[in-house]
Image: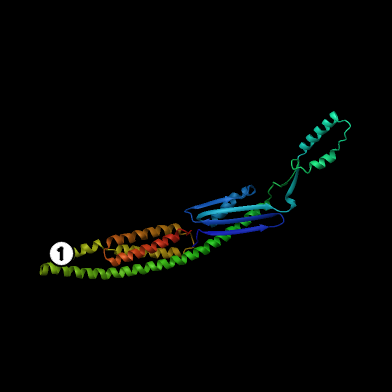
């Protein structure tokens, strides 16, 4: 069993690249992958999504990828020669026309222009090599492994809680089953005694049994108890599954809650009402926990 809540982070650094991948997830009905990454990682988006889908089945997955190039080997110089030629040409033309005696040194002027960012830029190289892509995928894969381990660890805690709740519920089913048998016997004896008090020896045994059967049938909860027993067995089976069972657990708890509500509506003894309240409380606790189960 895995939780839908988890966190995973992995980083890589060498003389050429620094890559950081951070993944966090929360509960969601379906799988929703949100990627936030620089444009140089865009070519690998589909591969990263597929990697996520193969490991994470449900939840809102937020993926943050950062990449930087380290070292001067990833820098390139861009000189805007066309601007320099245009500027120097216009300066020389102006000097020749208006100041023919003035000396013009192009080299000196170029040296000055190279200190101006309008004419020279140092930028990151734009090409992305194959090694970069392999590194991004490898770092992402390790981050996925970490969040998967985190979700598994959290899921094991939820499994322990659900196992305790399911055992508490089983105990209530057994208590209710035992009480119903005693209640029916006691109800029959009281019913016969009350009729004898009212009618004396004129009671028709056949009619008595018929009326008693009708009354007991209206409040009969044996079928509901049998179905609850089957549902609890299924619950315990799902709790030890390694595959995603969140949706199935959610449906199962709805069915169990329906049976408990039926028992409550068919039964009048306060003892049964109290047990029904306890059952519904446990089912609500289970429902809250499984909202986070993958």
Q: Position of residue 194 (x, y in %)?
A: 16, 68
* Number of numbered discs overlaid on the protein picture: 1
- Left or right of 118? Residue 234 is left
- Left or right of 194? Residue 226 is right
Q: Is residue 256 above or below residue 185?
A: above
**Secondary element at tag 1:** helix
Q: Is residue 164 above or below residue 24?
A: below
Image quadrant assignment for residue 115? top right
Q: Which residue is depicted at the point 62% across and 48% down?
A: 42
Q: Name the image colouring.
A: rainbow
Q: Position of residue 245 (x, y in %)?
A: 46, 59
Q: For mark 1, does the 10 Å Cα neighbourhood hold few (<14), some (14 to 19), or many (20 or more) residues?
A: few
149 or 270: which is nearer to us?
Answer: 270
253 or 96: which is nearer to us?
Answer: 96
- Left or right of 218? Residue 248 is right
Q: Position of residue 161 (x, y in %)?
A: 45, 66
Q: Which residue is depicted at the point 33% across and 64% down?
A: 276
Q: Which residue is mark 1?
A: 207
65 or 47: which is nearer to us?
Answer: 65
Q: Which residue is depicted at the point 55% across and 51% down?
A: 34
108 or 121: which is nearer to us?
Answer: 108
Hey, which residue is sitting farthest right in the picture? 101
Image quadrant assignment for residue 209? bottom left
Q: Position of residue 254 (x, y in %)?
A: 38, 58
């Amino acid at each position: 069993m895995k939780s839908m809540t988890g966190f995973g982070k992995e980083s890589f650094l060498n003389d050429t690249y620094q890559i950081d991948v951070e993944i966090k997830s929360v509960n969601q009905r379906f799988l929703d992958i949100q990627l936030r990454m620089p444009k140089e990682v865009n070519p690998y988006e589909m591969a990263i999504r597929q990697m996520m889908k193969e490991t994470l089945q449900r939840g809102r997955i937020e993926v943050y990828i950062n990449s930087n190039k380290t070292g001067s080997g990833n820098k390139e110089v861009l000189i805007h020669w066309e601007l320099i030629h245009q500027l120097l040409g216009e300066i020389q033309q102006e000097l020749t026309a208006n100041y023919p005696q003035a000396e013009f040194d192009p080299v000196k002027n170029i040296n000055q222009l190279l200190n101006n960012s309008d004419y020279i830029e140092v930028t990151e190289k734009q090409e992305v090599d194959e090694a970069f892509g392999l590194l991004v995928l490898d770092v992402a894969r390790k981050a996925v492994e970490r969040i998967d381990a985190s979700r598994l660890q959290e899921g094991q805690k939820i499994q322990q809680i659900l196992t305790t709740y399911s055992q508490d519920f089983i105990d209530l089913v057994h208590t209710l089953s035992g009480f119903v048998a005693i209640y029916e016997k006691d109800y029959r004896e009281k019913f016969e005694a009350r009729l004898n008090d009212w009618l004396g020896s004129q009671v028709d045994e056949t009619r008595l049994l018929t009326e008693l059967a009708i009354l007991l049938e209206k409040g009969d909860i044996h079928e509901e108890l049998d179905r609850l027993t089957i549902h609890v067995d299924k619950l315990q089976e799902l709790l030890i599954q390694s595959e995603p069972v969140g949706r199935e657990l959610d449906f199962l708890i709805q069915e169990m809650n329906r049976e408990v509500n039926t028992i409550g509506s068919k039964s009048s003894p306060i003892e049964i009402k109290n047990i029904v309240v306890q059952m519904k409380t446990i089912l609500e606790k289970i429902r809250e926990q499984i909202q986070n189960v993958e």
